[in-house]
Amino acid sequence: MTTRPRIPRRLGRLTAVGVALTALMAAVSGTATQATASPKTAGKPTVPSLAWTDCQDGFECANADVPLDYRTPHGKTITLAVVRKKAADPTKRKGTLFMQPGGPGNSGVDFVRNNYADLPAALRDSFDVFGYDVRGVGRSSPLTCFDDARYTRAVTEAKGVPGPDAYEPALRQAAEFDQACVDNSGDLLPYIGTAYVARDIDLLREALGEKQLTYYGRSFGSYIGTVYAAMFPKRVRALTLDGAYDPVRYANRPYAYDRPQYLALDGAMSRFLEWCAADQATCGFGDGNPRAAFEKLKADLDANPVPTANGGRANGYTLVYRLMFNINEGKVIWPEFGAALRKAQLRDNTSFLLRPPSPASFDFLGPNVAVECVDRDYPSDLRLLKRNVTANAEAAPLLGPAMAYGPPTYDHQHATACVQWPGEHVSRYDGSYRAKGSAPILVLGTTGDPDTPYQDAVALSRRLDNASLLTFQAEGHTAFGRSACATDAVIDYLVNLEVPAPGTTCADETQPPSSTPKTAPPGTTLSELRNGVDERVERIGAVG
């Protein structure tokens, strides 16, 4: 288990050939300026040229060629897919707003297209709204690790209640995942880290003619923004980091980062079950003891999976997987959770909690693991890994065991893959994260966030040299689009550069309705959840 597969070295040779060909072509054409320039000039990558074309509904699309490896800035390139919609009111235009989704693994192009109509009018009037697929994701040379068939087998065989011998199989499966990454995307893996993503953003900023960056990033997008500010502090105009990461723990002390994330997820699930016990009439699940009913349901589904409409199987792991993502909606979704759990008890495969991960999910999950394995510095000690995985599973008994011992998918399941990761880490960023000299940065944290714990936002606001923290007292993931108070603060900041007063707190979360709602309340994706089609597509929602 300690043998690590090696990444093919084809790419290094290709890069060298690319540099040589560039110099040769310049010499032949009589334009050898680049080849004879000073080292400083030769080391500056070319700003991409964006040829915009209409791509429906008022959006414009283009491709941007950026260096694959910034150590050889005029070598091989990678093409990034970008999209924008110009400011609705040119007289109010202040520049370009970069919109960065969470993940890693979500498409920034889709994020802009799916959310543009629900953005506040003040943002649509004031900015060209811009997004792009980061390297290795979506339309930008997507990487592949497990193929769809292998991923399907992995999630079908996983358990909601893993047995006492689950660790070793999890370790072996993670090594298989790593090898699949090497076999299918080895030429790309060293270059998908966030330091290179930040450099891409800076080139895109230049390509758009912006002197400084205006940016909204949620969840993992907040980490990308944090790294950008650290690398290019003087180029920040306004940076909104929503659902923020503690960057030091995330990148350099990953076990210290993982434990609070397990606890946050299980804490959110516990609070839902406590509400369910207190309001059985609305929840409709648990027969007076929802926690015990949930534990029994996981085991029952493992022992006797439910056939799905497409011929698959839904088991206890399926249940945990869906809860892990969809609990992000906050209290407003709790009645729907109760109804879906009750359906699962009745073996009704129309419950959205019994929808197994699909190929649409796998397109997100593979890059999610690979990018974090490049970004994060896990110790290579397998004994330390086992202690931490075991401790995390025990500390978060509701959802933690399935995550700890499941296949490499989302955040909680990365350690087994990342400890054995065979690739280089040339594109990771390891600090400092002060962003000294930057303009004021706005950090948002949600107190009951199950995905990015609130204490991470507090930590980031303290690590940054010039940051203001806005607190959203609520369940669920992120604040913008879920809170009118927080959304207004973000608008004032991005448009007018007005930072909220220190200690600003918003407490306007939509409360659970007294019955299962029929339509999605503002700021939620309830209608998608009911139809079981939420494949980690990020929607901000509209408040008010």
Image (cartoon, helix red, strand yellow):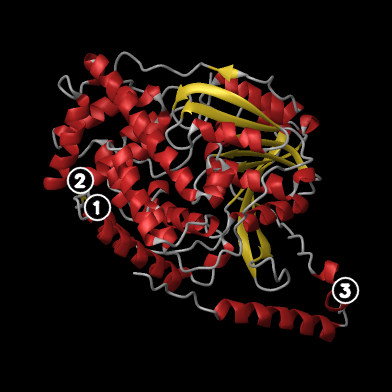
Tell me the residue at 44%/59% (across/down). Answer: 418
Residue indicated by mark 2: 315
Q: Amino acid at mark 3?
A: Ala
Residue 247 in the figure: left or right of residue 209: left
Tell me where residue 57 appears, x and y as whole percent.
Answer: 58, 42
Residue indicated by mark 1: 158
Compared with residue 338, is residue 326 higher up or lower down, i.e. above or below?
below
Callout 2 environment at 10 Å: few (<14), some (14 to 19), or many (20+)? many
Q: Secondary structure at mark 3?
A: loop
Q: Nearer the viewer, residue 305 or 381?
A: 381
Residue indicated by mark 3: 37
What label does residue 365 carry, if any? Answer: none
Q: Amino acid at mark 2?
A: Asn
Q: Amino acid at mark 1?
A: Ala
Q: Secondary structure at mark 1?
A: loop
Q: Nearer the viewer, residue 503 or 40?
A: 503
